[in-house]
Amino acid sequence: MSKRVLIFDTTLRDGEQSPGVRLSPQEKLQIAQQLSRLRVDVIEVGFPVASPGDFEAVSAVAREVRGPVICALARANAADIDRAAEALQAAERKRIHTFIASSEIHMKYKLRMQPEEVLAAAARAVARARQYTHDVEFSAEDATRSCPEFLCRLYRTVIEAGATTINVPDTVGYATPGEFAQLIRFLRENVPGIEDVVVSVHCHDDLGLAVANSLAALEAGADQIECTVNGIGERAGNASLEEIVMAIRVRQDVLKAWTGVATDQIYRTSRLVETLTGVPVPPNKALVGANAFAHESGIHQDGVLKHSTTYEIMRPEDVGAPGQRLVLGKHSGRHAFRERLLALGYRLREEDVEVAFARFKEMADRKGGISDRDLEALVEGMVQERPLWILDYFQVSTGNRTLPMATVSLIKEGRVVQEAACAQGPVEALLRAVDRAVGAEFRLLEFSLNAITGGKDALGEALVKVERDGAIYTGRGVSRDVLEATVRAYLQAVNRWLAGVPAHHQVQTGG
């Protein structure tokens, strides 16, 4: 049997507690409206007593957002609860969420209260909250480091006082999945009245186990999972909403559960939260990171081109993400390379594809991801006629107190020719060495270098115009190394001379 799991979103409350994050009331309203479109069950907007801004935000969301339950947080005291109730007045459906610490560490050092005093304060808080709403949630802060028997007494007390949801927080991200699941089972078996309330869990990611702990708790009997968009929150963050929801959807066969979340709104919600909080989503973040549906490995690319399920357990559109992306890099294969060229409108002969692929591999070894603009520059820079002279390697020695010297190795019809030359500058030395290797001299008329892609690993484009026997030949070369781009451009002009493809004939002038 499959059960309905409630998704309690605390992005606007616990998520905003991420270091450096501050959301204005208007920004909280904007995110809450998107969370409503996402169809979460509960939106915890803030802590009204904490500041006028939080009170205003809770009030605005309570007035404007319909659908989800609107929740406000309050400590277990009358002033907090009254302020939360005031902020929630206009809500269509409202919840007061009150809490008090239950671990020996917190009771002794933070609260300075005896266990019996904590029990009494929790009962009073829940009873007061019930005067304002029938929907009251109680959390035992630091539950996973609390005495299990005391937790049973505490939850029994608040259920008797009127709590409709009891929350079991792993406040400091201390639990492991096995022991957290065992705690939920222990509470299910030993708290009278627990079968009549919603059992919730709230996990932090200090050990990177927040999602795993939440799902373990679900299998052990939890009914509600508290989480945040992009997993933002205190310290290392909270359980990630998108990971929990999609794990439940993709592995319904194992988890036997479902949510009411509109998963095609996940990506849009993630981007909105990223923009307004200023907390960037890492590229390798599951489901919403830039690389979530990207493939660079040639084996993977070949597989997904044949059938997406070979390497994707869900479709990008399932979370509203942009389509599958093949990232070209040093691990990519010919299949993906050829497909990308076709998508860009290049239909090369098979032998030209091989030449282009070899150059692409050289480029990818020196550059990270290869962009479409990189590919365009690479293909546009190829001579359509098969080149006679091909660059094997080059080396330039230069400095501000040495005479530049260049060595080139060129290949023509399987024959390797090596030459060297010195000149006043490294480019001049390189071109002189090429002249010696090909056995012909050219007059350099124009030479320019341009960056054609951005960043420190940008591609450089070299453009040359040379003259020989009154005819002008042009060449274009592209490489991350500007000297390599230069020699490739020069060789393209040389090959055009050999092929008899001049740009035009130079106009003779004189008296």
Image: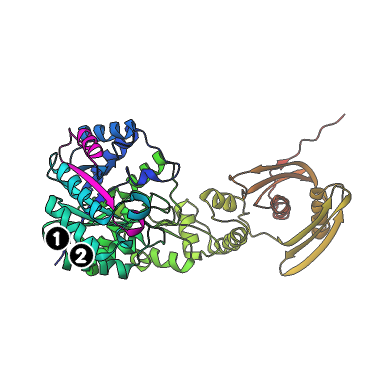
Where is residue 54? Give x, y as percent. 31, 35
Which of the two residues, 511 or 288, is positioned nearer the viewer here?
288
Q: Find numbered disc 2 in the image and state the secondary structure of the residue it sits on.
A: helix
Q: Residue type at mark 1: give it.
A: Ile
Q: Which residues are magenta?
A: 77-106
Say if mark 1 contacts mark 2, CB within 8 Å: yes
Where is residue 392? Give x, y as percent. 72, 63
Across the whole image, how many numbered discs are drawn on residues? Answer: 2
Which residue appears at 33% of the width and 64% of the height? 212
Distance CA(mark 1)–CA(mark 2): 8 Å
Above or below, comparing residue 376 to residue 58 in the picture? below
Which of the two residues, 131 or 382, is positioned nearer the viewer here?
131
- The C terminus sits in image quarter: top right
Above or below, comparing residue 17 to residue 330 in the picture? above
Locate residue 304 relative to residue 493 in the image: left or right: left
Q: Which residue is mark 2?
A: 187
Residue 273 in the magenta stretch? The answer is: no
